[in-house]
Amino acid sequence: MPTYTNKVIWKSEHLGHTYCGNGTEMDFSAPPALYGHPNMMTPEDAYLMAINTCVHMMVLWAVERFKLKLVSLECTAEGEVEEYIDKTSWFKKVVLYPKITVRGSSEGIVKRMLEMAKKYSTIAESLKGEIIIKPEIEIVK
């Protein structure tokens, strides 16, 4: 089984730096509303990005398995945070809004392909909150 690593270090205030096992590194901060710095990656951004990018890669895999002719693909992820009375919070649900255009298929096949992509997404399948896919599908000749 593969393993992945990540290291974080504190730089100052609400600012850190992260090193990924694949060589990627970047600064990150808490969200500005939580005393963080603006225009920086936040843990919340990284969470949504992890879901969105993993499902995206699995869509590309499923497109190949379904032998679909992909014309375009983009996806926006939106997370809904629920806060409890003690000020703890969690992502109750994440909605993915893929816009996908394929050539010479049907909407039903594309929807099945998206379900398969979600099912095989390691990140999406590892989460406690609900993951919903609301696609905008275009079929072209």
Image (spheres, rainbow, N blue to C red):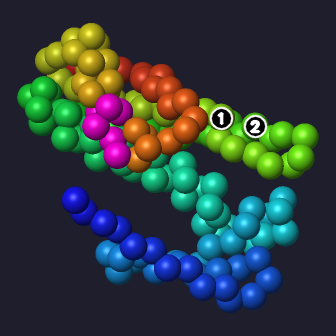
Report the side of 24 relative to 13 (left or right): left
Which quarter of the figure has residue 121?
A: top left
Whether residue 74 appears in this view of the structure is no
Front one among 111 and 12: 12
Mark 1 to mark 2: distance in Å?
A: 6 Å
Helix, strand or loop: magenta stretch: helix
Q: Amino acid at mark 1?
A: Lys
Residue named by callout 1: 92
Mark before the other along the chain sequence, 1 or 2: 2
Which quarter of the figure has residue 138?
A: top left
**Magenta span has 93?**
no
Residue 119: x and y in percent read 32, 31
* Residue 60 position (above or below residue 41): above
Residue 38: x and y in percent read 74, 68
**Residues drawn in magenta:** 117-122
Task: Specify the label residue 82 is tagged with.
Answer: 2
Q: Is label 2 in a helix, a strand or a loop? A: strand
